[in-house]
Image: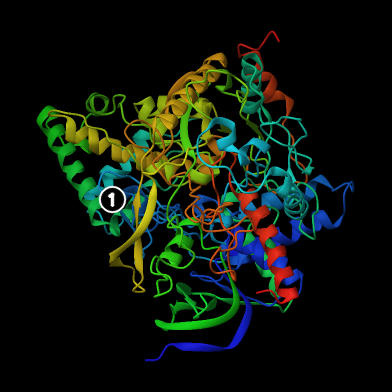
Amino acid sequence: MSELSRREAIRRSALSLTALGAGALVPAPLSRELGTMVHAALQEQPATSERSQAFLEHEWRLLRLLAETIIPADERSGSALEAGAPEFIGLLASNNDELRRILSAGMLWLDHESTSRYGAVFVEAADRDRTELLDLLAAKVVEEDPGYEGIVDSIEYAGFHHYTTEPRGQLGPGVRFFSWVRRLVVDAFYTSPIGMADVDYQGNDVLRRFQVPREPLQYALRRSPFRDE
Amino acid sequence: MQVMKSPKVWDVVVIGSGAGGGTVVKVLTDLGVEVALLEAGGMIDPLTDFKEHMLPHDVAHRGAYDDGASYFGRAPRGFFSAPNGFWQIPGEPYTVADGSEFEWFRSRVLGGRTNHWGRISLRFSDYDFEPYSTDGLGTDWPISYDDVVSYYERVERFVGITGSREGLRTAPDGIFQTPPPPKVHEALIQKACEQMAIPCIANRRAVITRRTNGRAPCHYCGQCGRGCITASNYSSSNVEILPALETGKLEIFPGSMAREIITDDEGRVSAVSYVDKATRTEQQIRCRTVVLAASACESARLLLNSTSTRFPAGVANDSGVVGRFLMDTVGFELWGNIPAMEGMPRYNSDGAGGAHLYMPWWEHDKPNKDFPRGYHIEIGGGFGMPMLGSFSGAASRQGGYGAGLKEALRQGWGTRINLAGRGEMIPNLSSYCEIDADTVDDWGIPVLRFHWGWTDYEWKQARHMERTFREIIERMGGDVGGISNPRRDGKGISIGGSIIHELGCVRMGSDRRSSALNSFSQSWETPNLFVADAAPFVSCPDKNPTLTIKALAWRTSEYLAELLRRGDV
């Protein structure tokens, strides 16, 4: 369904909810059905695994490996690779030289470091060697707070400022590179259908009435300092 | 080429289509007055321009733009947001004086900033109109709460505001629709506030929960900031201006950047000159009256740029106050992580697209405070739509990668709350705007230069916010994460202008020597010129300005219509 016709359908449905008038019982499946329809339409995403023109073959292999390593598949959901993280990064990098250079230079750094330490480029290094190296680069980074993401007013710009990590020393370039890749991979994963299902996002629906279920409320109260009130 | 003049003489030309302009258009066309509306931006089509039912993966770049602009701070406001403008608009610069920081969010589209605003709709209190009489700071308004209350009621009935009746002097009750219930994190915050004797009550927002004047109630998609295809929240475009077109009394001139107010020998407005952006030519539209509603600073700019022999300092500026007493809300935010919500069962927490509770000021009667006036608190939290940045910040703070990171992000989602203080600034002589004649925009129009300075009043207020928010978070068993207002100076307080509540600059008053406008927002010297945005504001109460902009614009419009009917302008 095209974007326009889908939104027109939502608008009409929302208007029809009201047309029934105050107090009228709206059959529950109406909103559920619409929500399902909307979200199903959104998941008709062409799966591409073609190499982005921004990267050479060996870079693409490395990027794919990093995506899968940062967010691997588990019993609950697929990996960032399956969620299209390399394609997302490739799209941006093919239109943005600054980003492409950051990533390409970082990949050269990583391969050089891996070769110096283990005698093999990163994708060919042993699992435990790769883990050892990434653990050095992925330590908790103290950085200026990127801003809260949930307020309507700041929903989109808040996250994009003040990433002022300044790791020093010989590992600095690798830490900064990994920080970029992790950010892009995590962003790609959680904005994908796989990632949204992983965290069980339930919003952006069309509802007749908004209600807060008891279960999460009881759960949070029970675990809070207000449990005895 | 000669400047083209319209053959028609309009009864009213309105400049700007936001909260003020929208109200003027609605009230005047309802009364049968013919209105021409100049809008510097383009038209809007809610159906195609509002992206409230898109998910990030609907586009391959997920909202970053194809060149990843949002990762480099170069993106316009947000791909999914209502079409709206940004802090910087290509070709429309402003300058900031050395030693000052100021940010100016402008919107160039029908409806202006009402397409995306937070919809928080708070009445001023009685004491807000008498700040000088209350504590000796600032200046009293020439009007009182009683002069405005019936206009608040008209706006609330027409727009539809949710809320609850509380009987608090700091938060006067209005005409309210049923508010949506508190979300989980809000219920916890309310418990902490109870212990601290801070009122935590139903938020007051322009999002309707029942059918109102032909508009459908909210369908709880949670994306008010992207616009609303069912017009269930208030934007002037959707609720006032597009409907007013159907009266046949309104003509819209999009892409028309007002340049100068033209006055005749008697000092009365005879026309407005504007640049037609499409043809890049200057035009004049003739009129009997003009209403400026271009936003506080744009309206000041227009007046200051309208110089003549009669008005060397600009139209409506014999007092010299135009551009002076620029104010913005004091902003300070803190976020915290609440372990009680870790791993919480998921639910759809969207609600009416914003917070369902808020905390009005609670220390109005407390003696010996170390700062004047007060603030209210806005709340953020919940399981918002995963967007770029929603998880990557948490991933950096968490550190690591792999299965452990993935599980930690899953458990930690929704545990973050945000507390935002929105407080009153005392007008001061260091905060103002003036014409920077050396710099022009793409339309050849001289731009504004801003000067800004917070004082100890605001710093101490921000520290009070910090102490309060810290205590709320800790009483919830949470950990303070850090300061979270995205645009802040070195000390953590919001940069001037960044709360997007700029107001003042063309203030009203009871004395023409110290004000530009009388109590009906009518120019003292040029009686067929009116101002209907936030420029007439005399003070900056701790209530978001939109509801009062609309109430005053409604009042001015009725006054203007009566003058037109009597032939007095």
Left or right for B234, reference A27: left
Residue displayed at 53% across by 26% down: B415
Left or right for B361, reference B421: right
Left or right for B436, reference A7: left
Given residues A198 and B526, the one toward you in this image is: B526
Given residues B319 and B476, the one toward you in this image is: B319
Q: Position of residue B252 (x, y in %)?
A: 59, 76
The answer to whether residue B27 shows anywhere in this view is yes
Q: Is B1 located above or below residue A120 in the figure?
A: below
The chain under label 1 reads: B
The quarter of the image holding the C terminus of chain B is: bottom right
Q: Is B492 located above or below residue A43 in the figure?
A: above
Given residues A120 and B180, the one toward you in this image is: B180
Provide the secondary structure element on which disc 1 rests. Answer: loop
The answer to whether residue A43 shows anywhere in this view is no
Q: How many marks?
A: 1
Amino acid at circle 1 = Ala
How does the figure colour the protein chain or chains?
rainbow
The quarter of the displayed image where residue B230 is located: bottom right
Q: Is B191 located above or below residue B256 in the figure?
A: above
According to the picture, the residue beneath numbered tag 1 turns out to be: B97
Q: Outermost residue, right direction?
A: A24
The quarter of the displayed image where residue B276 is located: bottom left
Residue displayed at 62% across by 49% down: B142
Residue displayed at 43% across by 38% down: A79
Residue displayed at 56% across by 23% down: B343
**Pointer 1 local density, CA inside 10 Å: few below 14, some 14–19, many at least 20:** few
Q: Position of residue B239 (x, y in %)?
A: 69, 61
